[in-house]
Amino acid sequence: MSFLLFLIMGGIIGWLAGLILGKDIPGGIIGNIIAGIVGAWLGSLLLGDWGPEIWGVYLIPALIGALVLVFILSLILGSMRKGRTRRT
């Protein structure tokens, strides 16, 4: 049951990161879950475990990590899209 709650929390964190930055995360809800989980891991790694915790996820580091991840991902995907339009 806790794994399911962790997935839900990852989806919410990923969705919030995309909403705050105004970027669409590729893959829909699966992309949101992956961005949230990887962002939570990245945020916890860089910032440690602090702040409010829900279902085993520290919200502030997770959200900051997801924001960084979505921002970097949008830069990479944006440059790939620009590269495709130049070639044709």
Image: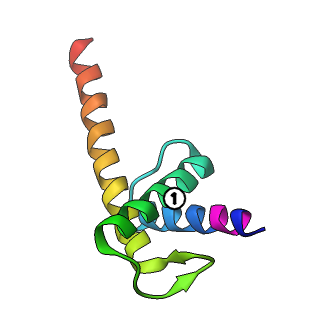
How packed is label 1: few (under 14 Cα within 10 Å), some, or many (20 or more)?
A: many
Of the 4 image quadrants, the one containing the N terminus is: bottom right
Q: How are the residues colored?
A: rainbow
What secondary structure is the magenta-colored segment mainly?
helix
Q: Is 17 on the left-hand or right-hand side of 83?
A: right
Which percent across, then down, holds residue 2?
A: 72, 69
- Residue annotated with mark 1: 37
Which percent across, then down, holds residue 77?
A: 33, 37
* Residue 5 is inside the magenta segment: yes
Which percent across, then down, holds residue 13?
A: 51, 67
Q: Is 43 on the left-hand or right-hand side of 33?
A: left
* Residue 38 is inside the magenta segment: no
Residue at image position (61%, 48%) is: 30
Q: Is residue 68 above or below residue 53?
A: above
Along the line of sight, the residue nearer the viewer: 1 or 11: 1
Range covered by the magenta-colored residues: 4-8
Residue kind at label 1, given as amino acid type: Ile
Residue at image position (53%, 51%) is: 34
Q: Is 24 on the left-hand or right-hand side of 9?
A: left
Which percent across, then down, holds residue 84?
A: 29, 21
Residue at image position (46%, 55%) is: 38
Count every numbered label the image shows and give the total.
Answer: 1
Of the 4 image quadrants, the one containing the C terminus is: top left
Q: Is residue 12 above or below residue 60?
A: above
Residue at image position (70%, 63%) is: 3
In the orientation shown, which residue stands out farthest toward the bottom? 52
In the orientation shown, which residue stands out farthest toward the left? 86
| SS at mark 1 in the image | helix
In the orientation shown, which residue stands out farthest toward the top? 88
Along the line of sight, the residue nearer the viewer: 22 or 34: 34
